[in-house]
């Protein structure tokens, strides 16, 4: 994965909004993709960072979260890696079924799967890769809106 933007964040949920805003400012903005980037990618990245900090790193302030964002052939990829032991994403129950609707777990994973074109995990389960395909094939711009 090409790395156009790399961030290392402390395990502190108050950093999530700032980090996501920074990534969004660096992403391409154009009429064809702006809405999908602004909603789908923003929500997916926010959920991935929240899960990494809350579940992966278990609120441990000594641990960090690595965020790598790249644009490759008309897709924006974000890879989020925590320092936790990982998990099996197939073991998380579907939050939309009647028996799970009131349970608090699995909603973030569900949102990521629904909003992004691809969501995949490494074998350890401490890294998620989010992919959003772009219509325009734009490029990342180091902190400057296109």
Image (cartoon, helix red, strand yellow):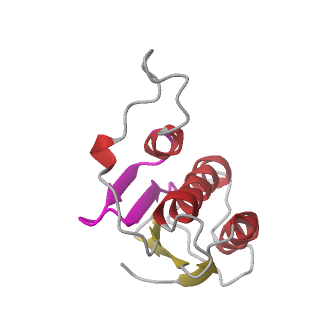
Q: Give the answer, above or below, for where 98 lies relative to 37.
A: above
Residue 122 magenta-drawn?
Answer: yes
* In-image side of 13 versus 127 (left or right): right
Place of residue 107 in the rendered image (x, y in percent of width and height, measured from the top left)? 52, 38
Q: Residue at x 66, y 84 (%)?
A: 142
x, y percent for residue 57: 51, 68
Q: Which residues are magenta?
A: 114-135
Residue shown at the point (69%, 64%) measured from the top left: 13
Which quadrant of the figure has residue 113?
Answer: top left
In the displayed structure, does residue 84 sit left or right of residue 122? right
Which quadrant holds the N terminus?
bottom left
| Horizontal side, residue 9 vs residue 4: left or right | right
Q: Quadrant of residue 87?
A: bottom left
Q: Is residue 146 visible?
A: no
Nearer to us in this view, 49 or 63: 63
Relative to 109, does residue 30 appear above or below in the rendering? below
How far from the left and from the top, in percent, is residue 95?
Answer: 46, 29
> Residue 130: which quarter of the image?
bottom left
50, 132: nearer the viewer: 50
**Circle count:** 0
Residue under the point 72% across and 70% down = 15
């Amino acid at each position: 994965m090409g790395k156009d933007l790399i961030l290392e964040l402390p395990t502190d949920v108050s950093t999530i909004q700032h980090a996501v805003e920074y990534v969004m400012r660096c992403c391409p903005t154009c009429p064809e993709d702006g809405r999908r980037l602004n909603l789908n990618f923003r929500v997916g990245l926010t959920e991935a960072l929240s899960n990494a900090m809350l579940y992966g790193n278990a609120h441990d302030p000594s641990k960090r979260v690595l965020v790598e964002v790249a644009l490759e052939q008309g897709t924006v990829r974000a890879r989020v890696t925590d320092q936790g032991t990982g998990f099996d994403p197939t073991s998380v129950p579907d939050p939309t079924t009647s028996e799970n609707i009131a349970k608090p777990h699995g909603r973030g994973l569900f949102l990521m799967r629904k909003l992004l074109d691809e969501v995949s995990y490494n074998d350890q389960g401490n890294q998620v890769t989010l992919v959003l395909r772009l219509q325009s094939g734009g490029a990342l711009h180091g902190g400057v809106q296109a």
